[in-house]
């Protein structure tokens, strides 16, 4: 199965993507996670990408396309994948279609997670990520320590791009560059809208009902 998960920053893509990929035993491909990994390792790609990521703007298409090309050539994505945070521009979507066509593959479904902007801002400001197990969760509905992961005991951190000024920029970028993808995938009949508001379990239930 080959899926694409669309949605604004904070819509819950990362959280749901992990669950869907694990349920269907397909590769979870998060371009944001891959880029953060490159930044951590201080690679050439990481150094270039970080300039954009810190400002809340998009990393240039050619760098992202190159990264996706390498992944699609890798065996682990052959049995299926869930794209999380890719494509993010019309150009990326068109290049992705061409790449898949060249491999004799196609997308089965695009899920668009929808959440109101006011809620997105609140969610992003309260979001924390575990440095060790990468679990994402919200301090908004959590009574434990805001610094220690309750799952593995790792250290929790707030992403640099979850600061208020960067959040605003990311939402603007989403509106202008990524939202047009909704129509792009609607036109080719692949898109299902899913309400991303509510508990993780509830949203997962809705996603499963459209897959
Ligand atoms: P995310 O974790 O998906 O919110 O991505 C974090 C940041 O990584 C974004 O704000 C962008 O700077 C960059 N990024 C992730 N995916 C893409 C993509 N497909 N195209 C361009 N930039 C991306």
Image (cartoon, helix red, strand yellow):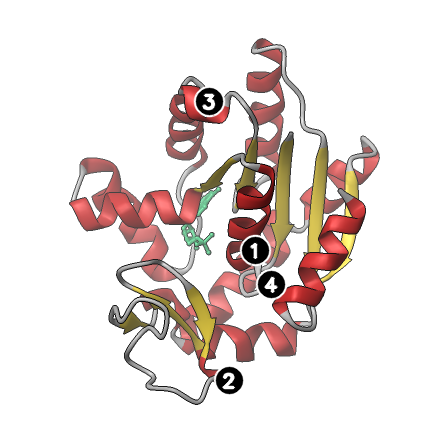
- How far is disc 4 from disc 3 in space, using C-alphas? 26 Å
Q: Report whether the residue tagged 1 is closer than 8 Å to ligand 1.
A: yes
CA distance for labels 2 and 4: 15 Å
* Residue for point 67% across, 21% down: 106
- Nearest to N terminus: mark 4 or mark 3: 4
Q: Quadrant of the C terminus?
A: top right
**Marking on residue 140:** 2
- Between the residue at mark 1 and the residue at mark 4, the CA separation in whole angstroms equals 6 Å
Percent across and percent down for residue 108 are 71, 30
- The image's mark for residue 11 is 4
Cβ atoms under marks 1 and 4 closer than 8 Å: yes
* Cα–Cα span, label 2 and label 1: 18 Å
Report the disc number at residue 13. 1
Query: At numbered mark 1, what does the secondary structure look like: helix, strand or loop?
Result: helix
When the figure is inspected, residue 6 is found, relative to residue 157, above or below; the finding is: above
Q: Local crowd at mark 1 within 10 Å, few (<14), some, or many (≥20)?
A: many
Residue corresponding to mark 3: 72
Q: Is residue 88 visible?
A: no
Nearer to the camera, 157 or 21: 21
């Amino acid at each position: 199965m080959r899926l694409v998960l669309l949605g604004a920053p904070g819509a819950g893509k990362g959280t749901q993507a992990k669950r869907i990929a694990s349920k269907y035993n397909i590769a979870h491909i998060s371009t944001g996670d891959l880029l953060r990994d490159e930044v951590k390792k201080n690679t050439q790609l990481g150094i270039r990408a970080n300039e954009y990521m810190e400002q809340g703007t998009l990393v240039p298409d050619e760098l992202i396309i190159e990264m996706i090309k390498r992944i699609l050539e890798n065996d682990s994505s052959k049995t299926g994948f869930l794209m999380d945070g890719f494509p993010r521009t019309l150009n990326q979507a068109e290049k992705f279609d061409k790449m898949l066509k060249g491999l004799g593959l196609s997308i089965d479904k695009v899920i668009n997670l929808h959440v109101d902007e006011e809620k997105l801002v609140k969610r992003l400001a309260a979001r924390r990520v575990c440095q060790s197990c990468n679990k994402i969760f919200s301090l908004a509905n959590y009574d434990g320590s805001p610094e220690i992961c309750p799952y593995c005991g790792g250290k929790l951190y707030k992403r640099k791009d979850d600061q208020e000024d960067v959040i605003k920029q990311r939402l603007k970028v989403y509106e202008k560059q990524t939202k047009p993808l909704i129509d792009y995938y609607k036109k080719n009949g692949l898109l299902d809208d899913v309400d991303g508001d509510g508990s993780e379990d509830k949203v997962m239930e809705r996603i499963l009902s459209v897959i």
